[in-house]
Amino acid sequence: MQRFERPDRPGPGFRCFVLLLIASAYSQASIKAQDALKDRVDQLIERLGSEDDAQAAKAQEALIKLGDKILPLLPASGNSAGSERAGKRLQEIRKSLDGAGNRSTGAAKVNLTGESLRLSDVMKALQRQTGNTLIDLREQNGQVATNPSIALDLKDRPFLEALDEIAEKAGLSLNYYNAEGAIGYLEGAAMMPDAAKPAPQEKYVAYVDAFRIALNQLLVSRDFATGASTANLRMEFVWEPRLRPLAMKLDTSKIEARDDKGRKITASVSGESMELAIRPENPIVDLNLNLSAPPRDAAKIESLSIETELTLPTKTLSLAVPDITKQDSKAEMGQASMRILEFEADPPVWKVRAELTTPRPAGAENLDSYRESGLAPTVALTKADSARIPLNGGFSVGPGNGPGKLVYELLFVDITGRPEDHGLVVEIPGELKTVPVRWTFQAIPLP
């Protein structure tokens, strides 16, 4: 008769199973913490509209104590909290947290830690924590929208750095040209069937505040007829989508460069001020820079420092209504206002007509008429989980019922869920400033 004995202690298989359970629980801790914070904020916001002033004041104090990490979780406008009383308290909260409508050019910070975080949860958390919009472009480009698990240890990591790491670990490529005021993501070529992985290349990427600059190409040409030599550098300048700059200038006299022999490298046209074409809805601009090429005995550009100036909204007026289907629902902030005139659903299109009053922002007098056209409001649908859906079907504008009023007809296409579960948020530039951005690349090999 065969005898079975129970082991005195668990075997290796059991121990592995326990470790997997622990890792799985730990991996979701960061995401669950964010969800718990949002639930807490939502509960306190509901109490802001209480007729009991003591209860409302206590909720306001509790929200302020939670700190500036709750700013992305607050309603974009006081009216979305349910009452005028709540709206005033929300404005006081924003002022106390020193974030009332401000668009800091400092990098938005990301905190995500776990051994097995689902990509969908990661992307939602990124948007909640930073206010930047991300769009999954895989299905509309014929790709399978997989949901892999990745390990992350991101603590106060700048948004664009964090996004690069997430994209690399999830096998994604990033698309900055989707014209929706967002960063899109696709399946990376190396992850697609039968795609050969490219050989690893040295990357020249600089992260400065809320900006990412990548040097993608360096070409050297030598004209044997004239003896002129030129080094052409092609760069991508990316910003966090929440910023939406309007103008960018590059003064070639501020370029500092030397080769590995210590010799100075100058711009081909020194003292020139280049104005670059920017489309605020695309968070990227291409930089094409010509330098005098170093002599042939130089092996690399030892150091290259470049400075640009960006004109962008540093303060915004945010207007939001919680339900796009409610006619005559309103939102106000200062001299800016929004009113829902009409909603119509004709699947797959949702049409929202809204009347906006948009004051001219401080600093707009320094923009020419072409650049000033970029001051159009930013529009998005909002969901209960704080996710934003950018305007994706276009819009038209006509005169409103009164001076300074315009009527926008907004089209949203292929939106999932019920219309009444979606709000509308409109962000209007409130103040413009020009800020310098300077970066440096080191040890760039010459071809």
Image (tube, grey):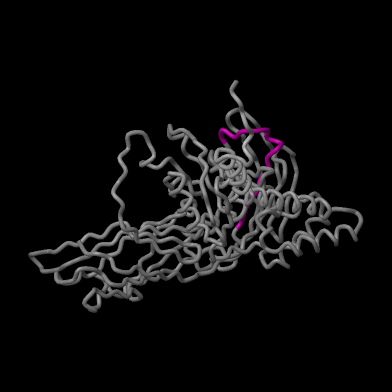
Extreme residue in the left direction: 225
**Residue plotted at (52% across, 57% down):** 159
Magenta region: 413-428
Extreme residue in the front direction: 1
Q: Image height check: is 2 above or below 227?
A: above
Q: Image height check: is 428 above or below 179?
A: below
Extreme residue in the top direction: 1
Q: Is residue 395 visible?
A: no
**Residue plotted at (59% across, 48% down):** 27
**Residue plotted at (90% across, 59% down):** 53
Q: Can residue 18 be seen in this view?
A: yes
Which of 282/21 is in front? 21
Which of 385/189 is in front? 189
Quarter of the image that includes the C terminus: bottom left
Residue 410 in which image quadrant: top right
**Where is residue 427 shown, x and y percent of the image?**
62, 54
Quarter of the image that includes the N terminus: top right
Q: Image height check: is 310 above or below 374?
A: below
Residue 4 in which image quadrant: top right
Asked if the magenta segment contains residue 9, the reply would be no
**Where is residue 196 shown, x and y percent of the image?**
30, 40
**Where is residue 385 shown, x and y percent of the image?**
67, 44
Q: Image height check: is 157 above or below 175?
A: below
Asked if the magenta segment contains residue 420, the reply would be yes
**Residue plotted at (46% across, 66% down):** 208
Q: In this view, does 79 lie to the left or right of 130?
A: right
**Where is residue 284 shown, x and y percent of the image?**
43, 55
Residue 21 in which image quadrant: top right
Q: In this view, does 345 lie to the left or right of 106?
A: right
